[in-house]
Amino acid sequence: MSRLEHIRIPEPEKPLPGLTISSDQGLIQWLSSVDHKQIGIMYLWLSVLFILVGGIEILLVRIQLAVPNNHFLNPEVFNQLFTMHGTTMIFFVLAPAIFGFATYFVPLMIGANDMAFPRMNAFSFWCTLFGGLLLYFSYLAGGAPDAGWFNYAPLNQFSYSSSPGIDYYCSGLLLAGIGTVSASVNFIVTIFRLRVDGMGLKQMPVFVWMILINSFLILAAFPSLNAALVMLLLDRELHAHFFNPGNGGSALLWQHLFWLFGHPEVYILILPVFGIFSEVFPVFSRKPIFGYGFVVASGVAIALLAFGVWVHHMFATGLGNTVNNFFAASSLLIGVPTGVKIFNWLATMYGGSIRFSVAMLFAIAFLVEFTIGGLTGISFAIVPIDWQLTDTYYVVAHLHYVFIGGSLFGLISGIFYWYPKISGRMLSEKMGRWFFWLFVIGFNLTFLVQHALGAMGMPRRVYTYPDLPGWGILNMISSLGGGLMGIAVCLLVYMLFTSRKTGQIAGSDPWDANTLEWTTTSPPPLKNFNLVIPVRSTRPFRDWKRPDDTDWAREGVNNE
Amino acid sequence: MALLSHWHFDPLLILFVAALTVLYGFISRFRRPTNNWYFGSAVFFFLLATCSPLHFFGMHYYFSVYMVCHITLLLLCGPLLVMALPHKPSPFVTTRLKAFAASLSSHPWLLWFAGVGIMWFWHIPIVFDDSMGAMQSGFSIISSIHPLTMLAGGFLFSWPLFSPIENRQLHPLAGVLYLFTACISCSLLGLLITFAPAGTYHHYIGMANMPGRPWNISWQDDQQAAGLIMWVPCCFLYLTGCIYLLAHWFSAKSTNAGRRPETIKPLILHENGKK
């Protein structure tokens, strides 16, 4: 029995309600859904909800920091806000958005009708949602967590943080972590078992490859975080002493366990985005991806290297020169496979017939912003520079250039690229360009100056600062930039809402794209495919549309 | 310069190398197969790790140097020996190689455990200290068994990846997983040695005040360096293996195995908008 026959299973034929809840069954259809597209959409809305919440939190922080000696917020509230902002953005904005795109598009891109385990797919989403709600319930339960997003010991111990916030941090992240791990298992099985007949691993879209690699990365990295969270809960609730040096525990152990997860987490949040760019660049350059094998292999290399460099987050903890030197060298190396990818995308654009759509604009901007983030990251591999700059605003700038300039730019590019497929409507390119410039200018105003602030010695996570030369004006610029970003995000959310009904009809293939998701209607019916076009290269839809100029014929791949 | 004069040729090991060379010559029909430089390299590295001043330094002065010898035996000599096996040996050898490959390849996880297990076993502190003590006390069978088991471990571990019988090799992606899990195991061992209390390996505490000990590195730093060598460069060797496998896989021409184009019919697209 071929795989094609495998996917011919009896399923409801009723169309999906699109992005609205106005169906005959209303909200219950969403709450009870096990359809990968609906669950993917819910992941994406979850991400939108939390980006607004996390955005408001950081705008309050930026108002506090806009001028020296400000008392708009008190220190306790300030600690809670920056902790919740970081935790929210990483665990409940970037991660769910990635899972949303993956849940929606992986089955479509491999020619399947759903994920391998649809109910587990729903379980993963609801775990993530309730994890987020549990984290935010801390505000009602007596106070939010306040020890930073990486929650260092001994600050996470009861004697330093007696409100229940950190207990909710542990419970919420643990629950979301279970959802993340189960989703990864689901992706792996789906990709290995449900690919349409003809799609070998070498014909898989790069996005699917990156999700596959990412899923293995998650399975290897998350147990460390989950174990650490359980140990911390035991410390706080049952008076265990894992992280309490006063009773034989080790505060550094938390850092090891956290960064054993935390450094791979950086790649967990960037590899799928590399996959998105590897779809966007070829489509809008009208060329195949340059060096498909290199792009995939460098993804594998990044995933493997991710576990060999986490100690560079701990250079300032006194591990000794021997340890520092080894990890300095290994950390410098990780720039190589990432650099390979950047050149792959540049080479994809080179000589192409480029269309500067908003998705492509964000992809191009990513090349600049992420390279800045990468270079500042490399500077942290040099131990004396790390000692000088650690825990300053330079780190804040670096991580935002990676997470925003890298991950978020990629996700936004993905929104503009795939929104027509999800909703059946186009996002306005004109408003999209306004959004692009507002966001990019706002982003650089906010974070570029923070490099200078960090180099001048301004520590991160201080609720206010003295009126030292230059600090006031640079912080004001940073806060104004944050405001611009806030306006831009509101514009994006407005576009997402209004375009559902008023956007131009998209059609099934508005971008003249390459992969299987564009062969079905926009939005796709409940059952994605009845029949799937032949797959003989990484651009099957293009091959199908241009039978005289197919990739597989040009590359001499013998499929007959 | 006096340090560089510390060559020590264990008769048993020299006998082993001679026997191995004869055996390899027999397998390759005493011709010069294209991959015989792998064999030459394997023998060179083996002698370097067991007879050279590197070995002497590792035995008497520095754990970190000894770790380099371990990795050389396990992750360089073992794979090089497997890669040295000729792809077209005599029919007599082919039959036996195929039988050997069949017996080994049916349970690759056992071979994984052989490689990883031997590495862990020799680094259990009590085993390590006793074996080093025995080796230092003069001629000892341990001094031969120790490197030979490391070499055998490396050979067995590498077999599923580089077996000369190609249809007995692991799929390259399975090979990546095979190496990656070994890398994690290796990292754990390195991590344990790095962060274990200084002096966990007693042998080198006693050596700290030996006359003629070069470089004056403390035994605490030395133990950390040993663990880090196991952890970081060792993992890069595994990673290099992964990239090698991936590169070969991507460069191999696609086949239509498992494809049935006749079962795939074109989808009728819904043309309800612009393309």
Image (cartoon, coloured by chain):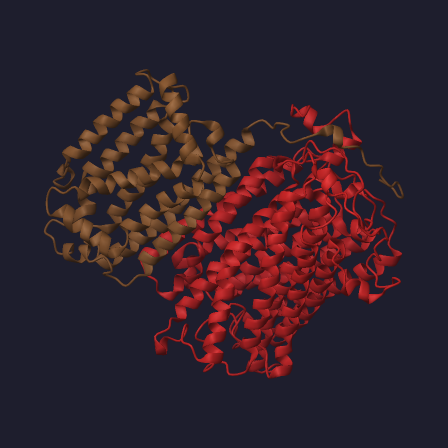
Chain colours: A red, B brown
Image location of residue B128, percent across then percent down: 23, 52
Is residue A146 something one can see in this rendering?
Answer: yes
Q: Is residue A475 above or below residue B251?
A: below
Query: Which of the image's four quarters has the C terminus of chain A?
Result: top right
Say which quarter of the image contains residue A133: bottom right
Image location of residue A370, percent across then percent down: 58, 51
> Does A257 sit left or right of A55 as displayed?
left
Q: Is residue B72 above or below residue B100?
A: below
Q: Is residue A251 above or below residue A196?
A: below
Query: Which of the image's four quarters has the N terminus of chain A?
Result: top right
Q: Residue at x 63, y 61 (%)?
A: A445
Q: Residue at x 78, y 46 (%)?
A: A528
Image location of residue A319, percent across then percent down: 34, 62
Q: In front: B265, or A299?
A: B265
Q: In front: B220, or A29?
A: A29
> Does A174 sit left or right of A102 as displayed?
left
Is residue A459 something one can see in this rendering?
Answer: no
Q: Residue at x 36, y 18 (%)?
A: B92
Q: Residue at x 38, y 39 (%)?
A: B157
Q: In front: A436, or B124?
A: B124
Say which quarter of the image contains residue A503: bottom right
Looking at the rendered structure, the number of numbered marks drawn on it comes to 0
> Does B179 sit left or right of A60 as displayed?
left
Image location of residue A40, percent across then percent down: 72, 56
